[in-house]
Image (cartoon, grey):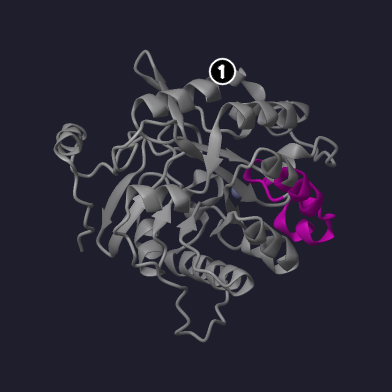
């Protein structure tokens, strides 16, 4: 299965040859006046207790007794984005969407993109193929029912599509997703797609073509550093994220920033965890909002779908969720 790239002007053709045929369209897509791109702003919508780092200390059976805090944090984030005329892609957990349908509708009504974060935040390595298929199908169906639009994108919990688990990408293509944002091209314990491409690119899978939109990284002295958001945004100097996005612009592409609603909630109840987990999960929570304000004032942001529509204008085969099982998919 081949995806058609749009016709290029001669200088653009030369540039594409230089970066390789599988590179996505460069920026600006159609020539014209050079302007700074809008980067991808992304949010993984989950509760403060559904985080993978807490899982060993907070069993899933206790989730039902934990108080929900996602809605107020999301309201704060949506207001913040509106204040800077920024839009973003929200990878929403199916479990959260089921409990907070109005939140999903509010996200879409504000002009943001609704995408899937799977059903129950189980890492890909903890699922078999059938379970993963059920999770991505069930969440896609629910989100599409709530917003009346096709869901194109997926991000795995904790970027957990690692080397050896690429079968998950085949499942995504088969289930009608057109892009994935799970391959974090860094080397980290428990996650990271070592040696992966850093900028948006095609993935030719046996089951079809998928576009990969990796979180932003920064290359310095031959080392690839994570510079996409989350704990790196809260705990490391702001300049790391800023440099990552600026470097993406210099490469004529867009960066991808990510954040979670619980990172805007410094007063969330604390789970008893070892020191290093406490630092990673709770460190710098009061910095999130001031740093977001700075980021939103320095860069423009939009949805992944909007950037991909500019980069891949010929891509029109967006598919809705498969309902051949009657939509009643058990996870
Ligand atoms: Zn997550």
The residue nearer to you, when weighing 326 against 276, is: 326
Taking the spot 72% from the left edge, 53% from the top edge, the residue there is: 59
Q: In this picture, which residue range is highlighted in magenta? A: 50-78
From what the image shows, is residue 14 above or below residue 243? below
The residue nearer to you, when weighing 298 against 153, is: 298
Residue at numbered disc 1:
239
Determine if residue 283 is in view. Answer: no
Are there few (<14), some (14-19), or many (20+) residues within 10 Å of tag 1? few
Can you say which quadrant of the picture contains the C terminus? bottom right
The residue nearer to you, when weighing 48 against 306, is: 306
Taking the spot 49% from the left edge, 38% from the top edge, the residue there is: 38
Element marked by disc 1: helix
Q: Is residue 70 magenta?
A: yes
Residue 198 in the image: x percent, y percent? 37, 34
Q: Is residue 77 magenta?
A: yes
Residue 227 in the image: x percent, y percent? 51, 28
Q: Count every numbered label the image shows and give the total.
A: 1
Taking the spot 60% from the left edge, 72% from the top edge, the residue there is: 142
> Does the closest atom of ligand 1 sit within 8 Å of the Cβ of label 1?
no
Q: Is residue 192 left or right of residue 296?
A: left
Residue 324's image quarter? bottom left
Can you say which quadrant of the picture contains the N terminus? bottom left
From what the image shows, is residue 260 above or below residue 211? above
Main SS class of the magenta portion in the image: helix
Taking the spot 52% from the left edge, 33% from the top edge, the residue there is: 228
Determine if residue 76 is in view. Answer: yes
Identify the residue at the far front of this view.
33
Residue 236 in the image: x percent, y percent? 61, 20
Residue 130 in the image: x percent, y percent? 45, 70
Residue 111's image quarter? bottom right
């Amino acid at each position: 299965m081949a995806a058609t790239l749009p016709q290029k002007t001669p200088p653009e053709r030369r540039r594409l040859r230089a970066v390789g045929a599988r590179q996505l369209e460069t920026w600006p897509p159609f020539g014209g006046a050079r302007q700074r791109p809008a980067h991808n702003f992304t949010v993984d919508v989950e509760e403060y207790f559904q985080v993978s780092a807490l899982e060993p200390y907070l069993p899933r059976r206790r989730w039902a007794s934990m108080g929900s805090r996602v809605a107020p944090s999301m309201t704060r984030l949506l207001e913040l984005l509106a204040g800077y005329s920024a839009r973003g892609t929200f990878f929403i957990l199916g479990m959260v969407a089921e409990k907070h349908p109005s939140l999903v509708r509010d996200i879409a009504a504000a002009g943001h993109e609704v995408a899937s974060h799977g059903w129950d935040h189980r890492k890909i390595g903890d699922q078999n193929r059938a379970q993963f298929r059920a999770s991505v199908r069930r969440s896609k169906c629910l989100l599409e029912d709530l917003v009346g639009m096709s869901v194109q994108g997926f991000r795995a919990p904790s970027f957990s599509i690692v080397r050896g688990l690429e079968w998950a990408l085949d499942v995504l293509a088969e289930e009608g997703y057109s892009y994935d944002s799970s391959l974090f091209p860094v080397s980290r314990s428990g996650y990271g797609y070592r040696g992966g491409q850093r900028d948006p690119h095609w993935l030719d899978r046996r089951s079809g073509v998928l576009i990969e939109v990796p979180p932003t990284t920064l290359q310095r002295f031959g080392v690839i550093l994570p510079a996409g958001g989350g704990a790196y945004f809260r705990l490391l100097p702001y300049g790391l994220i800023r440099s990552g996005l600026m470097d993406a612009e210099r490469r004529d592409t867009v960066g991808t920033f990510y954040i979670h609603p619980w990172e805007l909630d410094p007063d969330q109840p604390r789970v008893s965890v070892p020191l290093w987990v406490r630092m990673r999960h709770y460190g710098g929570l009061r910095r999130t909002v001031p740093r977001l304000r700075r980021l939103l004032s320095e860069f423009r942001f939009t949805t992944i779908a909007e950037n991909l529509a500019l980069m891949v204008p010929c891509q029109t085969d967006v598919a809705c969720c498969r309902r051949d099982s009657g939509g009643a998919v058990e996870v």
